[in-house]
Amino acid sequence: MSDRWARDTAIGLDSLKRLRRAGVYWATADGRWDINKVIEDGFSIAFVVDSEVNAAYARKVSQKAIIARQLRARSGYHNGRAPWGYQRPTPPAPPPDAPYNWRPPHAPAEPHSVTFARLQQLGEWCAVGMSDTEIADKATRIGWVLEHRHKGPVPWSKSFLKELLVSPFPREFALGSGRGTIIAPDGEHIEGQHVAAWEWNLWHRMDEARALNTKGTRGRAPSRPGMARMFSGLAVCASCGRLLHHQTRHGSIAGYYSAYLCQAVVRGYDCATRTSPLKTGNRGTRGYRGVRSETLEEQFAALVLDWELPAHWREQMAAEVNRVQESGKLEEVA
């Protein structure tokens, strides 16, 4: 039938034009239309009307599907496949007097017998500050097998963990509720009927840890063991105001040490902290001006000791991070 051919009139006509130029014959199985009939006098107008009816029907079906998903979400049930860590409940047997069109009642997703406990463990690892790469490596070392619904066993990856750890489905909707979160088609957060894998405080700590891990780490090489870029993306040059670049340096006496240096001149900007021309080669670049990491940490600690934080500062920061992730206003949070 032609309603399976194209749901848009312009696309259908353009596709038939390409087939005609390529010498390909086209016809519907019901015998109503073929590639020659659609351009005959009178029938061409009927074909356009038929295509518009098909497009209108597709739009109505899409609208009904959206309404159905919205009603299901507002009842606390998920739409689509059950996320990793959960499984669809086993439908009950139909009653003896059930009609031919009987359907089992709606039921929330159930915790999976194996992966649900692993989902909870992934949240604990993320909350203590482990990166996605470290979590994937640890899951592989301890023998966790990740099953894909089509490909079978697949290796753990950052892309899968990134999508999983930011999913709202396993997160507790409200403090002490014990229920997860459902996202409606219009984006509204609704309390679900399923059991939450990550309780309220845990997933807030997860967001804090992920925000710290991803801040200022794009395109950076891994640090040496024992060196952390605590102020990467935060420390700025006192002269030009641009972000300082973290480097692991080596001195003949001090050995390896961590420092934040201003690279404005290398990037084509002027900075008063540079006192000598750029020097290339394997001996380093003389003329950079910055600060060592331990000095910056001591200065920051002295400032923190003078601060008086409110009682619920952790919840306030987590709420701000969540709000920014939802709205995408990165400049505002910076």
Image (tube, rainbow, N blue to C red):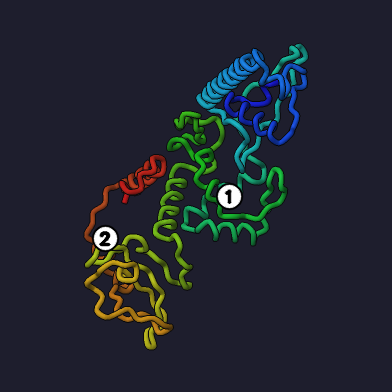
Mark 1 is surrounded, within 10 Å at the Cα level, by few (under 14), some (14 to 19) or many (20 or more) other residues, namely few
Residue located farthest toward the bottom when viewing the structure as drawn = 252
Callout 1, which amino acid?
A: Phe
Q: Can residue 49 be seen in this view?
A: yes
Observer-nearest of 226 and 28:
28
In which quadrant of the rendered image does the N terminus lie? Answer: top right
Residue 160 numbered mark, or none = 1
Q: Is residue 75 visible?
A: no
| Residue name at image x 54 percent, y 42 percent | 197
Residue 177 image offset from top left, x and y in percent: 47, 34
Residue located farthest toward the front when viewing the structure as drawn = 41
Find numbered disc 1 in the image and state the secondary structure of the residue it sits on. Answer: helix
The image quarter in which residue 329 lies: top left
The earlier-in-sequence mark between 1 and 2 is: 1
Q: Judge from the rendering whether residue 26 lies leftward or rightward of residue 264; answer left or right.
A: right
Disc 1 from disc 2: Cα separation: 37 Å
| Residue name at image x 27 percent, y 80 percent | 276
| Residue name at image x 71 percent, y 44 percent | 150
User: Does 22 appear above or below 70?
Assistant: below
User: Does 132 appear above or below 247?
Assistant: above
Find numbered disc 2 in the image and state the secondary structure of the residue it sits on. Answer: helix
The image quarter in which residue 10 lies: top right
Q: Judge from the rendering whether residue 213 lies leftward or rightward of residue 314; answer left or right.
A: right
Residue 282 image offset from top left, x and y in percent: 43, 83
Callout 2, which amino acid?
A: Val
Residue 100 image offset from top left, x and y in percent: 75, 14
| Residue name at image x 31 percent, y 63 percent | 243
The image quarter in which residue 26 lies: top right
Residue 304 numbered mark, or none = 2
Mark 2 is surrounded, within 10 Å at the Cα level, by few (under 14), some (14 to 19) or many (20 or more) other residues, namely few
Observer-nearest of 132 and 287:
287
Observer-nearest of 313 and 140:
140
